[in-house]
Amino acid sequence: MKTNELITKLQECANACFHCADACLHEEDVSHMAACIQTDQVCGSICLTTSKILASNFNDVNDLIKYCAKICGICAEECAKHDHAHCQACAKACKSCKEACLSYLNN
């Protein structure tokens, strides 16, 4: 996977996470969505940070990408627990981003 492709995946994942967190705030039982909201916020933030650092062509990024993949996996699992369309879309984006991070590391 090329750097530009990973940056795109990271940005798509961040967008899905922030959208999901916002949509969760409008669900009937917001307290039931607290873990999802928190995980979405962390995942979106790490994805944005990782994309910015990759865009700067900084060389020492492997540990950050590994951590990002880990958080994307955690977020995918959390969002998959909920039937809301925004949670399912976020879970899919996070899973795809995790796979992209791991693919990038294996190149």
Image: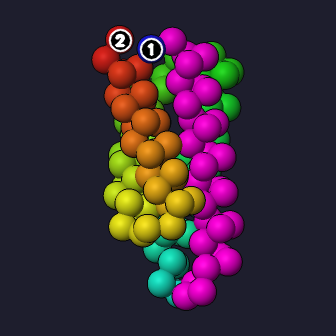
Identified at 60% across, 16% down, the residue is 4
Percent coordinates x, y for residue 6 in the rendering: 53, 24
Instruction: Tell me the quadrant of the picture where the N terminus can be found.
Output: top left
Front-most of residues 50 and 22: 22
> Residue at position x 60%, y 26% from top?
7
Q: Nearer the viewer, residue 85 or 18?
A: 85
Asked where in the image residue 23 lies, by quadrant, the reply is: bottom right
Q: Residue at x 48, y 84 (%)?
A: 32
Q: Work out whether 20 lies above or below 91.
A: below
Is residue 24 a member of the stretch shown in magenta? yes
Q: How many marks?
A: 2
Q: Is residue 48 above or below residue 42?
A: above
Look at mark 2 in the image and give the residue it sits on: 107
Q: In terms of sequence position, does the residue under pointer 2 or pointer 1 come before the other?
A: 1
Q: Main secondary structure of the magenta part?
A: helix
> For the point 65% across and 76% down, which residue is it?
25
Residue 53: percent from left, percent from top:
63, 29
From what the image shows, is residue 25 above or below residue 83?
Answer: below
Residue range (magenta): 2-30
Mark 1, other Cα within 10 Å: few <14 / some 14–19 / many ≥20: few
User: Which residue in the protein does label 1 denote?
Assistant: 1
Residue projecting furthest to the left: 106
